[in-house]
Amino acid sequence: MNIDLTKLPVGEMMIGFLVTAVVATFAIAFTIVDSGTGGEEDGGTEPMATPVIGSTDVVLGDNFFEPADMTVQAGDSLTLNLTNQGAAIHNMHIAGADGAYAVSGICETGGEDPCSDPASMRGGETATLVWDVPDSPGSQVPFRCDFHPADMTGTFTIVGAPEAPAEPAN
């Protein structure tokens, strides 16, 4: 039996191979994405908020905070070291313990709500924000940039203070 290589459907084979490769790539990609952090239905856990005790650095970019979700200890005094790495003017404004902002516009340093000092930072500038975390474990307190309140937000999740180790029994 002689096979005439000039009569093989090479074009159809190449198209079939490419279609198979694309389908396999999408199948593998969706499998990896679906098995990522997952939710409760597949036994996975949601991404955890960044735990913060005492102080932490926060980057303000154009339309984001990094980290945007932080876990803090009830009753802690927290110092946030802020750096504006974006091109726009930004600030950080923390809502009250009830989750509402007392000031609807641009917050003021030393005002009713915790606000960055200075209350506005140009690109490349730094600020600090000292916040006495409310003693209300289990609550979530939002924060935002007043210059971009719809896009630039985050949340503090307040947890109880760590329990002291039990005294050994004698």
Image: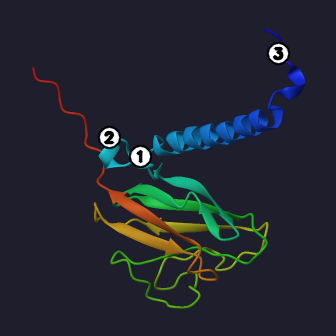
Three-letter residue code for mark 2: Gly
Which of 154 and 53 lies nearest the eye of the viewer? 154
Q: Is residue 76 above or below residue 152?
A: above
Residue 43, label in figure = 2
Disc 3 to disc 2, C-alpha distance: 55 Å
Q: Name which of mark 3 and mark 1 comes first in the sequence.
A: 3
Query: Circle 3 is placed at which residue position?
Result: 3
Q: Residues within 10 Å of mark 3 (few under 14, many from 20)?
A: few
Point 57% across, 81% down: residue: 149
Q: Is residue 53 above or below residue 135?
A: above
* Proximity of marks 3 and 1: CB atoms separated by less than 8 Å: no
Q: State the image coordinates of residue 111 (x, y, percent, origin top left).
A: 51, 85
Disc 2 to disc 1, C-alpha distance: 7 Å
* Proximity of marks 2 and 1: CB atoms separated by less than 8 Å: yes
Of discs 3 and 2, which sits in the foreground? 3
Q: State the image coordinates of residue 15 (x, y, percent, origin top left).
A: 75, 40
Q: State the image coordinates of residue 2 (x, y, percent, origin top left).
A: 83, 11
User: Position of 150 compared to 4: left or right?
Assistant: left
Query: Circle 1 is placed at which residue position?
Result: 38
What element does badge 3 sit on?
Answer: loop
